[in-house]
Image (spheres, rainbow, N blue to C red):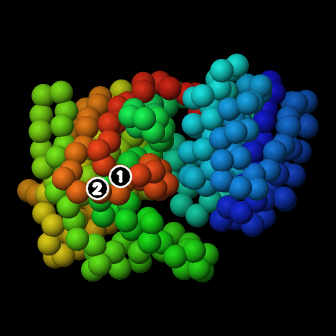
Amino acid sequence: MSYLIIVNPHAGNKEHKSITNRLTSMLDEHNKQYHIRYTTKAGDAQHFAQTAEKKTIIVLGGDGTINEVINGIMSNKTIKPRLAIIPIGTSNMLARSLRIPKNIQKAIHIIAENRRKDLDLGFISDERKRYFTIGCGIGLDAVAYKNVEPKIKKIFGEIAYPISFIKTIFNYEPKELLVKTDNHEEKAYYVLVLNTVKFTHFLELVKKSSYNNGYLDVLLFTKKDIISQFKYLLGILTKQHIRFDDVKFLKTKKLEIFSDEKVMLHADAEIIGSTPVKIEVVENAIEVVC
């Protein structure tokens, strides 16, 4: 077994050197071959994965780094490496969904055990051709991610996201979105297209779903007023949004989203443009060690 270790030294946890040493010590004990590459700028992780010749890529980073690696794996013309994660980012939503612990020694132990599962991916299938592991947000969610202030994120970590979300509610005017599937049309003002739906024991956006069921889960928030936006935020945090009449759910393999005015969208918290957008699921796209 051979490994490529991709380290983002700017991820949330600044102890990447000691963590890398602990990981490589485990690999040395098991007589495993490995090569380490450090990212210095956006796009490095994707390039390293795209040109990788190792069977497994271990990512020391957060969801943004993992997203780059996923896109590199899917465009690798030589081999399709499996993915392993040491979560050292701010949110680590994919690791949480896969039940990879924040505890570094336990995460390293999972890699040593080398148990694997298949993971579906979401795919922006228009000219952007971008894969995502967690989800794609259109509207309020994307603008909130764009508005996250780096200083606030550095100081408060994960709390920076709901802070930005609340500020965005006051400043953003939602635009109407038309969501089309093969046999269905719905209108909404804020849409989440999810590949993984459970991020912690408490935060689960869709009941009875999984990251390898061959479908995308779509949440449509159908009102635009400020009171409704705060209700949606509180509902998500308390898992009560599933009871709201103005929140609709779809399960689909592909969809298109249109709007008269351009509406911002993100994939795995990375802003990638605006509507219109075509999205589909890629079943059992990669193997993950978890």
| Mark with earlier residue (1, 2) | 2
Residue 196 visible in the picture:
yes
Tell me what residue is drawn at x 41 percent, y 52 percent: 273
Task: Give how far across and how far down residue 191 sits, in percent.
Answer: 26, 52
User: Element at badge 1?
Assistant: strand
Q: Classify residue 121 as left or right of residue 185.
A: right
Tell me what residue is drawn at x 29 percent, y 44 percent: 276
Tell me what residue is drawn at x 75 percent, y 30 percent: 52
The residue beneath circle 1 is 274
Amino acid type of the residue that numbered disc 1 sits on in the rendered structure = Ser
Mark 1 closeness class: few <14, some 14–19, many ≥20 residues within 10 Å: some
Residue placed furthest toward the top: 78
Report the front residue among 98 and 50.
50
Q: Classify residue 66 as left or right of residue 109.
A: left
Q: Quadrant of the C terminus?
A: top right
Mark 2 closeness class: few <14, some 14–19, many ≥20 residues within 10 Å: some
* Alpha carbons under labels 1 and 2: distance apart: 6 Å
Is the Cβ of the residue at disc 1 closer than 8 Å to that at disc 2? yes
User: Element at badge 2?
Assistant: loop
Task: Give how far across and how far down residue 69 sits, in percent.
Answer: 63, 40
Residue 108 visible in the picture:
no
Report the front residue among 100 and 51.
51
Question: Compared with residue 33, is residue 38 higher up or lower down, i.e. above or below?
Answer: below
Residue placed furthest toward the left: 245
Task: Give how far across and how far down residue 270 sits, in percent.
Answer: 49, 54
The residue beneath circle 2 is 262
Q: Classify residue 178 as left or right of residue 46.
A: left
